[in-house]
Amino acid sequence: DARVTQTPRHKVTEMGQEVTMRCQPILGHNTVFWYRQTMMQGLELLAYFRNRAPLDDSGMPKDRFSAEMPDATLATLKIQPSEPRDSAVYFCASGWGHEAFFGQGTRLTVV
Amino acid sequence: SQQGEEDPQALSIQEGENATMNCSYKTSINNLQWYRQNSGRGLVHLILIRSNEREKHSGRLRVTLDTSKKSSSLLITASRAADTASYFCATDYVSNTGNQFYFGTGTSLTVIP
């Protein structure tokens, strides 16, 4: 049963620390998305890759966030340094064409 | 922002009743999709309607699309307690970098047994 896998599922960290979230997209999918979900803002598109190339990361605060796809089986989202306002659930999704398949998310709490 | 808006924000109905959720968006789209999110989980794709379609059915789901009004509705008939979840519309927006999905604010549906 193919699925998008995200690790860790939960992360609690102190302000100022680096946080790395990982995503394994579904094999064969050529598109990977990173979303952030908060009560206030809903689901925000942070970054978007096609065939491993970053196409749009305009939704991401560039000074502290970075997204990469070192290979087709791994996408990463880093926050350095983390801040309390980064607390949210971060979702990775992969797709081929017009449907996105979501991972279970990483719940990040920055204290 | 490309995000759409949904209404109502929250909806509570009795089991067996129909639930209707609406979504409005801002830009021209290729298609519109509806997703469901159970508490603490990722989103699950429900149904896709293309911009040249006006209505689509899938089981107990009925989706309509009015591109002139930039709006869509999701109807769940004969609701069940298991339908309790948040429902999001997502617009497939074409930019010069390809297809991007933007999600609405969501409708939280509670179906009371």
Image (cartoon, coloured by chain):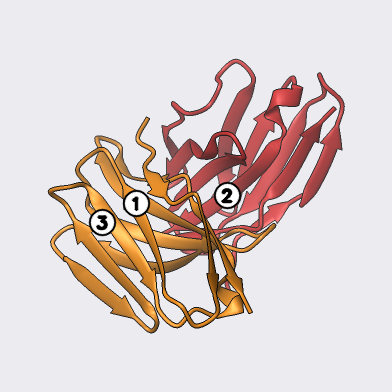
Chain colours: A red, B orange
**Which residue shows up at 62% across the image and 38% down it?**
A38
- Name the quarter where the N terminus of chain A is drawn: bottom right
- Quarter of the figure with residue A68: top right
Q: Residue at x 62, y 73 (%)?
A: B112
Residue at screen point 59% across, 34% down: A40
Give the class, few, some or many, for how many residues have Cα within 10 Å of label 1's Cα (few <14, many ≥20).
Answer: many
Residue at the spot x=40%, y=61% of the render?
Answer: B34
Asked whether, in this view, residue B36 is left or right of residue B82, the answer is: left
Residue that badge 2 annotates: A92
Observer able to see residue B72: yes
| Quadrant of the image occupied by residue A24 | bottom right
Q: Give the mark toward the camera: 1 or 2.
A: 1
Q: Left of A11 or right of it: where is A79? A: left
Residue A2 in picture, x, y percent from top left = 57, 72
- Helix, strand or loop at label 3? It is strand
Marks 3, 2: nearer the viewer: 3
What mark, if any, has residue B110 been given in the picture? none
Helix, strand or loop for disc 2? strand
Q: Chain of mark 1?
A: B
Residue type indicated by callout 1: Cys
Residue at mark 1 shares a chain with residue at mark 2: no
Q: Earlier in the sequence, mark 3 or mark 1?
A: 1
In 3D space, how far apart are the residues under numbered discs 3 and 1 (Cα atoms)? Answer: 13 Å
On the image, numbered disc 3 is attached to which residue?
Answer: B31
The correct choice, above or below, for A63 with respect to A92 in the image is above
Residue B11, placed above or below residue B2: below
Cα separation between marks 1 and 2: 23 Å
> What amino acid type should be assigned to the residue bearing mark 2?
Cys
The disc numbered 3 marks a residue on which chain? B
Under circle 1, the secondary element is strand
State the residue position of label 1: B23
